[in-house]
Image (spheres, rainbow, N blue to C red):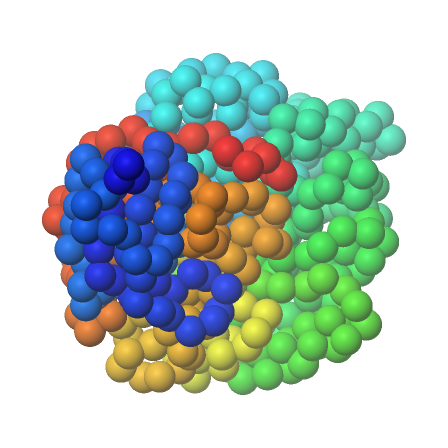
Amino acid sequence: MPERYDLVLRGGTVIDGSGGPGARADVAVRGDRVARVGAVDADAAAAEVIDVSGHVVCPGFIDVHAHDDTLVLIEPDNEGKVMQGVTTVINGNCGAGVVPQSASRRVLESEAPLPEWDSYGGYLDAIARQPPSLNVATLVGFGTMRAGALSGAQVTRPATAEEIERMRAWLREALTAGALGMSTGLIYEPDRYATTDEIVAVAQPLAAGGGLYASHVRGEGETLLAAHAEAMEIGRRGGVPVQISHHKASGRAYWGYVRRSLAQIEEARVRGEDVTADQYPYTAGSTRLAAMIQNGWFGDGADGAREMEVLLASVPSRPAWEGRSVASLASELDLPIEQAAQRIVDEGGASTIAIMFSMDEADVRTVMRHESTMIGTDGIGWGSRPHPRHFGTYPRILGRYVREHGVIALEEAVHRMTAMPAQKFDLRGRGELREGSIADLVVFDPRTVIDVATYEDPRRPPAGMPYVFVNGSAVVRDGVHTHARAGRAVRRGVDR
Ligand SMILES: [Zn+2]
């Protein structure tokens, strides 16, 4: 009896995510699983056979640093992520989560109608009922919980024991429902007023629940090392693994600091601490303009940051400003730059998103080379001119940094996008391409794969990535989005 498959990818080079060398092999899929890796008989029956010779077949990319908590419900195609090979997003980063929902609407900046939920279980159920094109996992946002627990109170004060217990209850529920851990965003409101002790107290359920601690640390310039030390201290005191979010040194005066912060991570790892980081491969960051003002970006003590260009990505009430620089609007408005930035927030909306060129290319490469670094987009998909990382992160690594500049090897890059995050975040059945694993797969041409999205024209899918499969279904075929809603709510430690 010939074998029967739903899909055979014939003649490609399989890079399995382990970091080991690629090897020529066919890949056969039955249902949502990889059924065979190796030679598939010519007489095997298959609903679809695709010749992928000259291409790499690898596990789907796991975007460990996503902010698509509501985007997956509002724009279920998730074009930016799906077209670049992302098959699973890990949302809830930088302290911005979805519970309580009343607070999350303020943090996640969505005006569109959403289903209602009262818990992380409810959120993941909403994803399962209305699946997007890719898989969705989530971290619990500390800032959203803090905004909810201290609602109506002065958020600059420490949380009371009662408020801490309320946050812990949300966290416990989330971990039971399958959340992967808790994130903080310690430059943001209201996270920034939480002391280390408060965060440790709230994080207490993580150890028993098996979650990790991810942090947008308190400073990425002068205070980078102290900020990393705080994240590691929280990990040690809480007995949990640590993920440093978007590892970087921001501001010209601090370029090169990443050599010290990498040494600091190495020391922690030598002590036996589970400390890793993620990175997006660009020299510009992106966040809310209001948060930049609040953190002194445009002020006198701005660490030399003022000379750096700031572009507007998303301006909800003044979309015509998207793509403009804050400096050009400041001259048009005849205002000093900080006042102009404030005017833009006042008129454009509190959720105005900006892009700032703050990093050194040499630092980006230094961080990328390091074994502690995995890949995440940090994409923010709103507005007409989002940061191109939302569309280009993974092909940019594979094309620009692997092929063109040889910063890391291809197999290593794939590992940092697949098995390494799956292991760290405890996603079972994903991140590896082997018989029995879930068929989240990407097919790309290593000779041509490249990001095409730019700051001027960011909503462009990459080149050289013709197929993406999620749970065995094609979501990209011949370089075109199929609109299949093949994603699932992914829960920690569950092989499904
Ligand atoms: Zn962040």
Q: Is residue 156 above or below residue 304?
A: above
Q: Is residue 65 above or below residue 78?
A: below
Q: Is residue 473 above or below residue 412?
A: above
- Compared across the picture, whether 119 is left or right of 393 comes to right
- Compared across the picture, whether 10 is left or right of 214 comes to left
Q: Is residue 373 above or below residue 7?
A: below
Determine which quarter of the picture holds residue 464: bottom left
- Compared across the picture, whether 58 is left or right of 275 comes to left
Label count reads: 0
Residue drawn at (50%, 33%) of the image: 496
Between 275 and 15, which is closer to the camera in this rendering?
15
Residue drawn at (35%, 58%) of the image: 38
Residue 416: image x %, image y %? 48, 64
Residue 148: image x %, image y %? 64, 26
Residue 155: image x %, image y %? 69, 36
Tell me the quarter of the image containing the N terminus: top left
Residue 124: image x %, image y %? 51, 25
